[in-house]
Image (cartoon, rainbow, N blue to C red):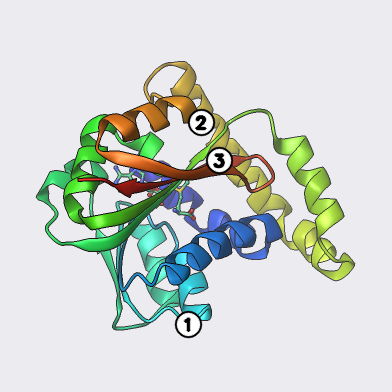
Amino acid sequence: MNNIWDKVAKPYNNISNISAAHQEKFDFVSNFVIANRATSLLDLGCGSGLLEKSLIRKGFSGEITALDSSKMMLEIARLGCIRNSVNFLFFNLNQLSRLQGAFESCVAINSLFLVEQKKETLMQINRLLLSKGFLILIEPTFGDHSMPFFINQLKKEKFGLLRKFFSKSLIDVLRVAISQRGISNMIKKKEITLPTKAEWMDYLKGGRFEIISEGSIQLDENYYIIARKTL
Ligand SMILES: C[S@@+](CC[C@H](N)C(=O)[O-])C[C@H]1O[C@@H](n2cnc3c(N)ncnc32)[C@H](O)[C@@H]1O
């Protein structure tokens, strides 16, 4: 699994950096974290550090612990975000029981569907959160969204950006699409279990969380659930 993310780290980072829909998603999370005055944040599966960049751009000054198990993703993240308050760590999310700490908020963007034991992971997140702490969970819908995504991207981007998007990024788009297909195949073969939004909400409610809000994001490619620790 890690090799997939190492290979795709650069194109994934390039596309997310110039896609307005991706940026809106990171800004949505940053705005929520900042509005709730969190001073400590745990980012599970931080990838190339795009959320961290968005948070810093918006003036977040709290401590961030950002975990990922792809060395390439972490390398890009560390280069793009040099701050004492941001700690990027090589860490396997399947071993969350080994992590110590107490955080006001926790974010997982397109990473929790990749862990082996979903409910156990939510229990560990609950343990790591302070009282009334928030979990912002974003997960992929994995429908056939490629065409609608590009059409929306066309409508959304300004002309200059659009030219940049297609001229510079076509190979990146193809590389990411190939890796997404690889993951879709793993889901089909049941090597990865992909809970639905309703299932995640049930797991959360059973795992001592209350649901605060939920909805669709990134042009329906993703959905989000914001939950608060009850106990
Ligand atoms: C789809 S990317 C999302 C990255 C980032 N959250 C973002 O939205 O840009 C999934 C990330 O989860 C990481 N990942 C996958 N399995 C993991 C595991 N078991 N432990 C830690 N990170 C993992 C990958 O390395 C990758 O960076």
* Image coords of residue 135 (percent x, y): 36, 50
Tag nearer the camera, 2 or 3? 3
Q: Which residue is drawn at the image coordinates 68% and 51% (left, top)?
A: 171
Quadrant of the rendering where the C terminus is positioned: top left
Q: Which residue is drawn at the image coordinates 38% and 26% (left, top)?
A: 192
Q: Earlier in the sequence, mark 1 or mark 3?
A: 1
Q: Residue 22 occupies which quadrant of the picture?
A: bottom right
Mark 1 — residue? 59
Q: CA distance from mark 1 to mark 3?
A: 25 Å
> Is 127 drawn above or below residue 141 in the view shown?
below
Q: Amino acid at mark 1?
A: Gly
Tag nearer the camera, 1 or 2? 1
Residue in the foreground of this view, choosing between 34 and 4:
34
* Image coords of residue 196 (percent x, y): 48, 26
Mark 3 — residue? 223
SS at mark 1 in the image: loop
* Image coords of residue 74 (percent x, y): 36, 63
Q: Which residue is drawn at the image coordinates 73% and 52% (left, top)?
A: 170
Q: Earlier in the sequence, mark 2 or mark 3?
A: 2
Mark 2 — residue? 182
Q: Do the CB atoms of the residues marked 2 and 3 lie less than 8 Å apart?
A: no
Q: Amino acid at mark 3?
A: Tyr
> Is 23 drawn above or below residue 151 in the view shown?
below
Q: Which residue is drawn at the image coordinates 21% and 33% (left, top)?
A: 120
* Image coords of residue 123 (percent x, y): 20, 39
Residue in the foreground of this view, choosing between 137 and 161:
137
For the question of whether residue 196 can be seen, the reply is no
From the viewer's perspective, is 144 left or right of 38?
Answer: right
Q: CA distance from mark 1 to mark 2?
A: 37 Å
